[in-house]
Image (cartoon, rainbow, N blue to C red):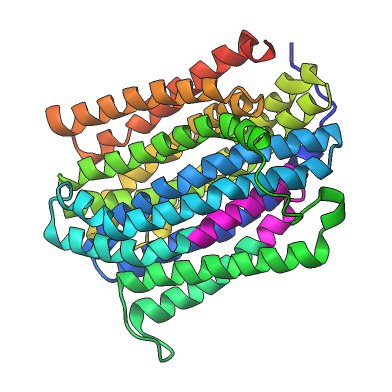
């Protein structure tokens, strides 16, 4: 029997598509960085992969806390307790901004010594260190943007996310071209230019969010910017919900960083191939992220509105829409692999080595389209400790598989990327079993 819900496909799309468009703009940054640095050289490309993932691992700590905040905002929105939304946002800021400062200090003063003993290539390490030192300044703006995103996704005004990300993308593309290669009177900075461009772009998005919120959002309705001070009880409630998601996201992206560090030992070409594929894979995940946010928001909303019976129906409809969207992306990628990869690099050898891996991850994205929605359905119920357990089990198996393929069996890069199937299948199966046995209702 197909589960039902009063939430329509149209309503899901209305929430998801602005996030998808925002993700498209966000991925213009990812594609632009990879495409420009791919023309600088394989060392810059490999260093950007490791440095970018290192930054994203730290970013995911804030992202996890923001998801927890978003779930609470959506719950209060469903309960029509609008003034509690602003209070929730203020308490979230009490955590996010000090965390940003702590992470900035870590990246500036400790990341270099940490990576120096892990990265085998001296050239790759030097460029990675340069990237991280410049990129670290963006963490303040990135975490602030996450708070704004949590608020607007939670109240289902997701078009704002699209506009802000387009501002971010336009600024980044222009500055990437200018600062990496030294055009329009700007200095030629190479990989440091890519990092600095991203920092300025994030600052531009923060400015947009602030102006829009002050001028176009009802601060009185949501009790925004009231600055009532630290409230231990509310802060603790947010932290208890969000902290498992923080750890879960940290582990998820951290496992990808470990994957790249293992691949780095194989040489600069496999690392460059993996960075190109990572950039492409993230594009395939655009609709997955959009519908995942919709799943989180709508599951929390119907629970807040005392319509728990609709949770399976909400998840089912999101799975259908995500599967269709990702399949369309995959058909395009399988039909035009060389043309797609030529966006990232003009190196014929790199393109040739990347095509088999592209085919592997394209099909893996179809599995992930189902498993990730189920997984976000678990998070949306508020049982974040269980989503953490699912993520932990999945990552342990994923990393053990990667280690065996790279260090024990010495397989080629095409086979190594099949670990994405392992990740998707285990996550989807565990999430389905949890939802099927309705443990979240307890």
Question: In the image as oriented, which residue stretches furthest toward the top?
Answer: 437
Taking the image as shown, residue 293 lies to the left or right of residue 394, namely right
Start-end of magenta stretch: 140-163
Instruction: Quarter of the image for the N terminus: give it.
Output: top right
Image point 76% across, 43% down: which residue? 85
Please say whether residue 141 is one of the residues in the magenta stretch.
Answer: yes
Residue 409 in view here = no
Q: Nearer the viewer, residue 255 or 113?
A: 113
Question: In the image as oriented, which residue stretches furthest toward the bottom?
Answer: 185
Residue 75 to residue 132: above or below? above
Rendered location of residue 16, percent (x, y): 69, 44
How many discs mark residues in the rendered view?
A: 0
Rendered location of residue 402, percent (x, y): 26, 31
Rendered location of residue 298, percent (x, y): 74, 33
Name the image quarter holding residue 42: bottom left
Please say whether residue 421 is one of the residues in the magenta stretch.
Answer: no
Image point 47% across, 21% down: which residue? 390
Residue 391 to residue 346: above or below? above
Look at the magenta stretch and give its main secondary structure.
helix
Taking the image as shown, residue 81 lies to the left or right of residue 49, namely right
Name the image quarter holding residue 419: top left
Image point 38% across, 48% down: which residue? 278
Q: Nearer the viewer, residue 265 or 196?
A: 196
Residue 245 in view here = yes
Rendered location of residue 67, percent (x, y): 60, 39
Taking the image as shown, residue 186 lies to the left or right of residue 93, namely left
Image point 59% across, 51% down: which residue? 146
Instruction: Quarter of the image for the C terminus: give it.
Output: top right
Residue 240 to residue 39: above or below? above
């Amino acid at each position: 029997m197909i589960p039902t819900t009063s939430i329509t496909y149209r309503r899901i799309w209305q929430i998801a598509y602005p996030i998808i468009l925002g993700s498209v703009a966000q991925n213009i940054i990812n594609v632009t960085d990879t495409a420009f640095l791919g023309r600088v050289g394989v060392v810059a490309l490999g260093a950007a992969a490791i440095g970018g993932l290192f930054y994203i691992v730290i970013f995911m700590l804030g992202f996890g806390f923001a998801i927890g905040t978003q779930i609470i905002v959506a719950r209060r929105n469903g309960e029509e307790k609008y003034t509690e939304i602003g209070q929730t946002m203020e308490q979230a800021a009490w955590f996010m901004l000090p965390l940003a400062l702590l992470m900035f200090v870590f990246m500036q003063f400790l990341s270099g010594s940490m990576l120096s003993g892990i990265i085998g290539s001296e050239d790759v390490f030097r460029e990675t260190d340069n990237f991280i030192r410049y990129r670290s300044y963006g963490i303040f703006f990135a975490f602030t943007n996450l708070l704004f995103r949590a608020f607007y996704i939670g109240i289902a005004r997701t078009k704002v996310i699209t506009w802000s990300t387009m501002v971010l993308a336009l600024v980044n593309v222009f500055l990437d071209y200018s600062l990496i290669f030294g055009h329009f009177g700007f200095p030629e900075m190479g990989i440091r230019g890519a990092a600095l461009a991203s920092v300025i772009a994030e600052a531009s998005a923060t400015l947009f969010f602030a102006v829009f919120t002050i001028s176009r959002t009802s601060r009185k309705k949501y009790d925004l910017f009231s600055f009532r001070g630290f409230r231990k009880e509310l802060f603790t409630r947010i932290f208890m919900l969000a902290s498992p998601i923080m750890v879960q996201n940290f582990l998820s992206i951290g496992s990808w960083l470990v994957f790249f560090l293992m691949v780095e030992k194989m040489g600069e070409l496999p690392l460059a191939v993996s960075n190109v594929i990572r950039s492409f894979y993230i594009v395939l995940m655009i609709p997955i992220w959009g519908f995942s946010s919709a799943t989180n928001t709508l599951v929390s909303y119907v629970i807040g509105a005392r319509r728990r019976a609709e949770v399976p129906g909400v998840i089912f409809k999101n799975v259908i829409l995500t599967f269709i969207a990702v399949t369309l992306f995959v058909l395009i990628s399988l039909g035009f692999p060389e043309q797609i990869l030529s966006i990232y690099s003009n190196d014929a050898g790199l393109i040739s080595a990347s095509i088999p891996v592209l085919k592997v991850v394209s099909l893996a994205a179809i599995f992930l389209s189902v498993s990730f929605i189920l997984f976000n359905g678990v998070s949306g119920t508020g049982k974040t400790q269980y989503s953490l357990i699912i993520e932990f089990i999945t990552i342990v198996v994923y990393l053990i598989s990667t280690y065996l393929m790279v260090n024990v069996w010495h397989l080629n890069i095409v086979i190594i990327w099949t670990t994405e199937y392992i990740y998707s299948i285990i996550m989807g199966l565990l999430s389905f079993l949890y939802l099927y046995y309705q443990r979240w209702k307890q």
